[in-house]
Image (tube, rainbow, N blue to C red):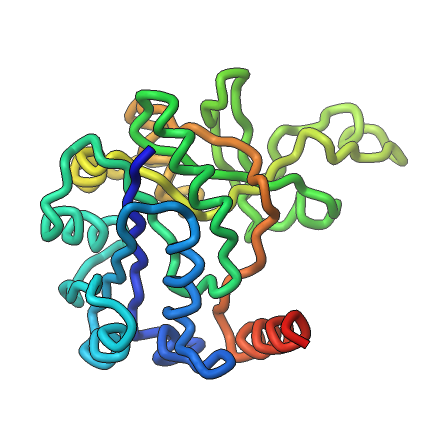
């Protein structure tokens, strides 16, 4: 199985400016992500940035870096530009890995790629089991339900599936086994990335503020499977950054 990893690394961040270059134990965050992705078995790992500082820093440890436009409205648009610049075949499997996940599990990258390798679906992603009841009702935790063939049926910020007996009977215990939280790692066929940005916006994605619903709305399959390794949280804030640094220091102690 061959696949390419693309790591978007935008410089601008409201809560953590210059996030890709944040120092983590002597290396910029994006380098940690790159090195983890290289362990996934990918045939190529490319970093895509919109800022010269990031480009220059990344060039110190790899030649596989491309400069993209600053005016993209979504990460998928940026991905499409990179696919064009690399002249990837339309059937090439592309895994989009976020540049703010320095604790990325390489096993999950290869897993999501293999979901496409074993099917003709244009897109794949992962989930994890929900283990805390509060997460079921947390709108920031995106829930997903799937069918017997590992096709996603729906993604929602609401508590899906709806446990009718537990939620409508006072004092009943909510059983967590059916609940899955979506993990934001995606694999695409390169040709579908360009097709996706041409699809019309769906009313469902607007209501839920979830771009992946556009794919289901237009009748395409998204393969999904529970992640082999439970992912660590990404870095959005200075506090997140400190937690990652502390974790790596304790792991290497």
Picture quarter with the N terminus: top left
On the rendered structure, is 18 left or right of 103? left
Residue displayed at 52% across by 79% down:
238
**Residue 243 percent coordinates (x, y):** 61, 74
Residue displayed at 22% across by 74% down:
59
Residue placed most toward the observer, 64 or 68: 64
27 versus 210 height, above or below: below
On the rendered structure, is 150 left or right of 191? right
Residue 249 visible in image:
yes
Place residue 33 in its image quadrant.
bottom left
**Residue 190 percent coordinates (x, y):** 21, 38
154 versus 253 height, above or below: above
Residue placed most toward the observer, 173 or 9: 9
Place residue 181 in its image quadrant.
top right
Picture quarter with the C terminus: bottom right
**Residue 70 percent coordinates (x, y):** 17, 67
Residue 206 visible in image:
no
Residue displayed at 57% across by 72% down:
244
Residue placed most toward the observer, 227 or 152: 227
On the rendered structure, is 214 left or right of 176? left
Residue displayed at 31% across by 50% down:
5
**Residue 24 percent coordinates (x, y):** 49, 78
Which residue is farthest top? 148
Query: What is the count of numbered marks?
Result: 0
Which residue is farthest right? 171
């Amino acid at each position: 199985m061959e696949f390419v990893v693309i790591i978007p690394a935008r410089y601008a961040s409201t809560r953590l400016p210059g996030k890709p270059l944040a120092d983590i134990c002597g290396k910029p965050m994006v380098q940690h992500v790159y090195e983890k992705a290289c362990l996934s078995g990918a045939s190529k790992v490319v970093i895509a940035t919109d800022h010269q500082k990031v480009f220059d820093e990344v060039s110190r440890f790899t030649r596989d870096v491309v400069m993209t436009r600053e005016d993209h409205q979504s990460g998928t648009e940026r991905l499409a530009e990179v696919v064009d610049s690399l002249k990837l075949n339309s059937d090439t499997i592309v895994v989009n890995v976020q540049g703010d996940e320095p604790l990325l599990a390489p096993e999950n990258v290869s897993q999501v790629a293999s979901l496409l390798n074993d099917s003709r679906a244009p897109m794949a992603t992962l989930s994890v089991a929900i283990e805390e009841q509060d997460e079921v009702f947390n709108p920031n935790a995106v829930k997903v339900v799937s069918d017997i063939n590992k096709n996603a049926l729906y993604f929602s910020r609401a508590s899906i599936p709806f446990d009718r007996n537990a939620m409508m009977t006072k004092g009943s215990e909510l059983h967590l086994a059916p609940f899955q939280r979506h993990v934001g790692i995606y694999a695409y066929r390169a040709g579908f990335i360009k097709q996706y940005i041409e699809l019309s916006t769906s009313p469902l994605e607007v209501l839920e503020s979830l771009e992946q619903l556009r794919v289901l709305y237009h009748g395409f399959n998204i393969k999904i499977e529970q992640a082999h390794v439970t992912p660590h949280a990404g870095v959005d804030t200075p506090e997140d950054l400190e937690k990652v640094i502390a974790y790596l220091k304790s792991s290497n102690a």
